[in-house]
Amino acid sequence: MRDLVGGTALIVGGSSGIGRAVAGLFAARGARLILGARDPARLAAAAAGLCGSTRCLRFDMRNPAQTRAALAGLPEAGLDWLVITAAEVAHGPFATMPVDAARALFDSKFWAAYALCRDALPHLRDGGAIVLVSGVLSRRPGVNCAALGAACAAIEGLTRGLALELGPRLRVNCVAPGMVRTPLHDHHPPERRDAMFAATGASLPAGRVGRAGEVAQAVVMAATNGYMTGQVLDVDGGHTIRQFATG
Ligand SMILES: NC(=O)c1ccc[n+]([C@@H]2O[C@H](COP(=O)([O-])OP(=O)(O)OC[C@H]3O[C@@H](n4cnc5c(N)ncnc54)[C@H](OP(=O)(O)O)[C@@H]3O)[C@@H](O)[C@H]2O)c1
């Protein structure tokens, strides 16, 4: 189904994980792609798997000057869709995680996305859409995840505020993934990571953790459904309704 031919998507975070899967789905439907991230090698590898016209923008979205310089190369009103999956996240006990580490988490997960949405406004054409990514922790907290849950909740609040303020010119939605098997978790030793996936998966109604492509399907739906705005789509294997007590 090549129903997105003629449209252009900027996917910030498109070199890995969920963003890379989003790029693949947009490409399969005929959209032109622009991938944003910091590491040029990972950007090039992601672009190589897509159509030849895929552009790569190398920037750190926490740095406003870099972001604006990258966007300056794009034509005005040249984007149909802005998808922001990029973020670096951190965990730690509330009592001992330094406040500066929590601030850095918010800089990456929330403030960088906030500023990027603002800077991208002139580049989004009328009728376009923004999709942000939060996480299940916004409403189902995890131990050692207070700051990350708060940042995810902030992204969901931003989604609703932007949808109200930017409509009807633009639609704004959010996807909230549960645990998904992506390179985000590769900082763990493989055995520990796989044990975490197995334990989390066993606790979920779906019986397993998610795949990047499953979250990407929701992102592309939110980007392209013209009557949907201000919403948070949970793609979490049932994490928000799971229970531990049985019998
Ligand atoms: N995977 C999960 O289990 C899970 C669960 C809930 C929510 N989420 C959320 O889903 C989103 C995507 O996660 P993922 O698993 O796809 O992560 P991932 O595989 O680590 O990919 C992150 C992407 O963002 C880019 N990026 C990170 N910081 C950036 C920055 N400052 N400027 C520009 N690009 C940056 C990375 O490339 P460079 O490093 O080269 O810049 C990479 O392309 C994140 O917001 C995450 O919090 C993930």
Image (tube, rainbow, N blue to C red):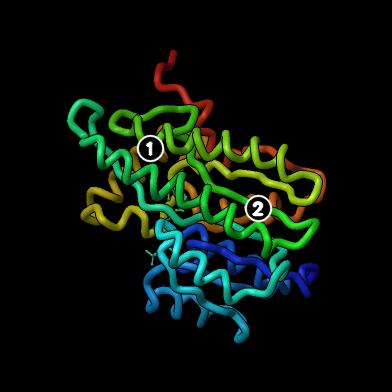
On the image, numbered disc 2 is attached to which residue? 130
**Residue nearest the observer in this picture, 169 or 191:** 169
Residue 183 placement, left or right of 170: left
- Image mark count: 2
Local packing at callout 1 (Cα closer than 10 Å; few below 14, some 14-19, many 20+) is: many
Which labelled disc corresponds to residue 9? none
Task: Indicate the position of residue 174 as horizontal and vertical percent values.
Answer: 61, 44
Identified by mark 2, the residue type is Ile
Q: Does the residue labelled 1 lie within 8 Å of ligand 1?
A: yes
Residue 172 shown left or right of residue 197 in the figure: right
* Image quadrant containing the N terminus: bottom right
Amino acid under disc 1 = Leu
- 3D distance between C-alphas at marks 1 and 2: 21 Å
Residue drawn at x 42%, y 53% is 87
Q: Which residue is drawn at 73% across and 42% down?
A: 229
Q: Where is residue 173 in the image (x, y as percent from the top left)?
A: 66, 44
Q: Do the residues labelled 1 and 2 touch (CB within 8 Å)?
A: no
Question: Where is ligand 1, by quadrant?
Answer: bottom left
SS class of the residue under badge 1? Answer: helix
State which quadrant residue 201 falls in: top left
Q: In this view, does 171 lie above or below 31?
A: above
What secondary structure is marked by label 2? strand
